[in-house]
Amino acid sequence: MSVPQKTVVAFKSYQNQAEVLVKKYLFADPFIPYTSILGGLLACKVVYDLTQLISTFYFKTYSSLTKIQRIEWNNRGISTAHAIFITTMSLYFVFWSDLFSDRQHFGLVTFRSSPLSAFGLGVSVGYFFADLGVIFWLYPSLGGMEYVIHHSLSGISVAYSMFSGEGQLYTYMVLISEVTTPVINMRWYLDTAGMKRSNAYLINGVLIFFLWLIARILLFLYLFNHVYRHYDQVMQLHIMGYLLVFVVPTALAILNLMWFGRILKGLKKTLAKKQ
């Protein structure tokens, strides 16, 4: 049975109108920050619901959890999805894209940005807002003050970089550290599922150690070295951007070192039990 010609024409008309709406408004440069933040918030809700739905049917452990544990289980699904997205975007912009490359000569690297780079940061801002809201709602069940400080610093710096277009390269460098989030969440899942003595738990601990060392220790040294080599360009940032390039990475580096000490201590304890 063929589709009536009028229906086809009407469908194409609505399709064209939708495309115009998306191009002229939702993804027009002035609206990208707001569209991406809203998209990030909506994505968090979708992932939360999908995690809840999938876990209910495929994980027996889920039904035996307390209400707070189920919320944290679902919330970690959100942080895992965000980590995969933003790590991919960050690796692309820092190591593969020409946008922030020194080989390009179209302006200072500290002021370069693009619609895609702004969009990626906006999605991340939406995630940090959503996650911070859940942390405050259930405080301190889902994390203490160190999580509040981490998310607040991250959210403010990412939002400023997105809206101003300043220091986006350094923002993406810091966001690469989100690569550790999936394995940390997996550790919590294994622990909650009663698999703390399994080989999977041990392998997970080793992965956390090496990923943390690379992404949250060595990468930050690379970031500070890049800032040093481009200090003349960093000095031209506005005072807020200047402070965020120095204060936020430094504060996060201190937190990373503190957490790395805990990770090392926990890994030693796990290895000692296996002997």
Image: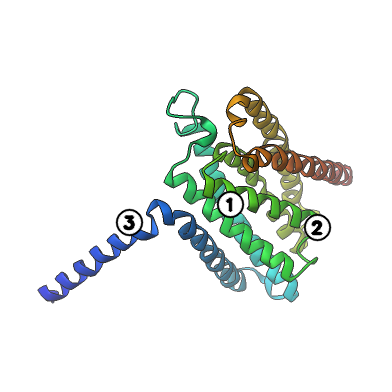
For this orientation, the residue located farthest to the left is: 5
Kindly tell me whether residue 61 is visible in this rendering: no
Q: Secondary structure at mark 2?
A: helix
The type of residue carrying mark 2 is: Met
Q: Residue at x 69, y 71 (%)?
A: 70
Whether pointer 3 and pointer 2 mark residues with C-beta atoms closer than 8 Å, the reply is no
The type of residue carrying mark 3 is: Lys
Q: Residue at x 47, y 51 (%)?
A: 119
| Location of mark 2 (residue) | 145
Q: Secondary structure at mark 1?
A: helix
Q: How is the image coloured?
A: rainbow
Up/down of 129 relative to 169, above or below:
below
What's the distance in space between the residues labelled 1 and 2, CA to CA? Answer: 21 Å
Whether pointer 3 and pointer 1 mark residues with C-beta atoms closer than 8 Å, the reply is no
249 with respect to 82 (left or right)? right
Quadrant occupied by the N terminus: bottom left
| Location of mark 3 (residue) | 23
| Location of mark 1 (residue) | 159
Q: Position of residue 4 (x, y in %)?
A: 12, 76
26 with respect to 136 (left or right)? left
